[in-house]
Amino acid sequence: MNRYVIIGAGNAGLEAASTLLDKDVEARVDLFNAEADLPYYRPQLTKIIDDLSKLKPVKPKSFFSAPGLHFHPETDVKSVDTAEKRITAGGKIYPYDKLIFCCGADPALPPIQNPGKARLFSIRSFADVQKLHVAAKSRRTAAVIGGGPLGLETAESLTRLGLHVTVYEIFTRILGRQTDNEASRVLTEFLKSNGISFSVGSQFSITGAHHIAPHGELPRQTDVIVVSAGIAPRTRLASECGLEVAKGIVVNDRMQTSLPDIYAAGDCTEWNGSLCGMWLPAGEQGRTAAANAAGETAVYVPKAGKMMLNLFGRTILSIGTPEPKGDSGQAVSFVNKKNGSYLRLFTDGTRCTGLFFLGQPAEAAQTVTVFGKPTDGTASPLNGFE
Ligand SMILES: Cc1cc2nc3c(=O)[nH]c(=O)nc-3n(C[C@H](O)[C@H](O)[C@H](O)COP(=O)(O)OP(=O)(O)OC[C@H]3O[C@@H](n4cnc5c(N)ncnc54)[C@H](O)[C@@H]3O)c2cc1C
C-alpha cells in the first residue's frame, strides 16, 4: 500500500486527493488542512462580503469519508523530514511514500508608505471575510488597494453592504493585465456609473489609522482599507525542508519539485517562471501531480488565460493578450447599440488573439467562441455589434 500525504485541501489538494483515490485504490491518503471550515469555493470570498451565508463547500461531506482518505481539518503540517520521509502535524508523525505540497498562498502586501496604525484587511480565507464583514458593516467608506479582478469584486461587495468605495491603483489603469487603455477606460466609466470612485496612476500613503492620501493630495478619511494586490506563495515549509524555491516552490511540467517523491501544485508553486493564482489551473496541477505520484506520466499543459467576472449585473470577460500582435495586428472596439454591450478585439491581422467583453451575461458564451477564430478586425464577429 502506498502512503500519500497532501499538505493543503484547497482545489489543488482536493483534486490531487480524488485523483490518487481513483488511480491507486489501495492508497492511504492523508489530507491535511490548516483551516477549520470544510474546503470551500475560494473564488466566492470577494463576492460574499455582504452575505456570508452564500459560502458553498467544494465537495460534499461524504467525499471526506471515502475509503483510503484520512482528512485532518484544522491541522497544520509543522515540519517535513525528507530523509525519513515523514511529516509532523497535530503532534503526531505521519510517514509518506509520496508527498504533495498544495499549501496555497498568502495575500501579497504592496510596499505602502507609512502604514502607521492602519488596520489593513486582505482576503484569502473565510475567516478573513468574516472579520472584514464585521468591520465594514454599518460603516460609510472603504478604500480598496488594487484594481485587479479581486479588488473590483471586493469593491462591488462592499458597495452592496452600503459603503462608498474608492479603488486605489498605482498603475495607470484598472484590470491592467486584462485590458488595454481603451478597454480599461470603458470599464472604469461603467463602474463609476455604479458608484465606485477611482484613484489611478498615483502612489499613495496611509496616514493614521483611517486616512489614505494619493500623492500630492490631502488625506481622505476612510473607515476600512482592504488590500488586494496579488499573491505570495506559501513556501516557508518547503524552504525549510530543502526544496528549491524562487517566487514559489519550483516545479517542472510533471509538478515534481527539486527533491524525489515530492510534488507541488496550485498557488504555492512556480511553474515555468510563473505563479498559478487561479482556481481551475490549481486543480489541473493537483491532478497532474497526483497522477505522477501514482506512477503515471502526466504533463501540465496550461490553457489560454481567461478571466470572467460579474459586476453590477454585467459580465466582464477577458481572453488571451489584450494588445495587437505583430505589424498587422489590430485593436478594434464594437458596441451592441441595443443593450450597450462592449467588445474589444485584438488580432494578429488574421485571427483573434485576445478579447475584452463588458456586457450582458447572456452574450458571454457566444463571445468566448470568438477567441482564436479568423478575423481581420474589420467586421464584428458577434451578431448585433457594430
Ligand atoms: C478572494 C479570492 C478570489 C478569487 N477569485 C478567483 C476567481 O474568480 N477565479 C479564479 O480562477 N481564481 C480565483 N482565485 C484564486 C483561486 O482561489 C486560487 O488560485 C485557488 O484557490 C488555489 O488553490 P490551492 O489549492 O493552490 O490553494 P488554496 O485554495 O489557498 O488552498 C491551500 C490550503 O492549504 C492550507 N495550508 C497551508 N499551509 C498548510 C499547512 N502547513 N498545513 C496544512 N494546511 C495548510 C491552507 O489553509 C488552505 O486551505 C481567488 C482567490 C481568492 C483568495
Image (cartoon, rainbow, N blue to C red):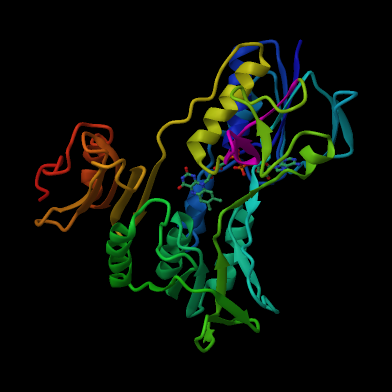
Range of magenta residues: 261-274
Does 267 appear above or below 71?
A: below
- Give the side of residue 199 with respect to residue 90, left or right: left
> Where, by quadrant of the figure, is residue 112 drawn?
bottom right
Q: Residue 15, percent across and down?
A: 57, 28
Tell me, yes or no, if residue 88 can be seen here. Answer: yes
Residue appearing at x 55%, y 20% in the figure? 299
Residue closest to the eye, 332 or 73: 332
Location of residue 77 (image quadrant): top right
Q: Nearer the viewer, residue 360 or 299?
A: 299
- Quadrant of ligand 1: it is top right
- Where's residue 44, x and y in %? 48, 50
Residue 18 visible to an observer of this rendering? no
x, y percent for residue 120:
63, 69
Q: Name the foreground residue: 88 vs 237.
A: 237
Residue depicted at x 49% and y 25%: 301
- As drawn, which residue projects farthest toward the bottom? 218
The N terminus sits in image quarter: top right
Number of marks in picture: 0
Q: Closer to the camera, 88 or 299?
A: 299
Left or right for 27, reference 182: right
Q: Quadrant of residue 276?
A: top right
Q: Is residue 143 above or below residue 109?
A: below
208 within the magenta span: no
Residue 169 x, y percent position in the rendering: 47, 67
Judged from this view, the residue extending furthest toward the front is 327
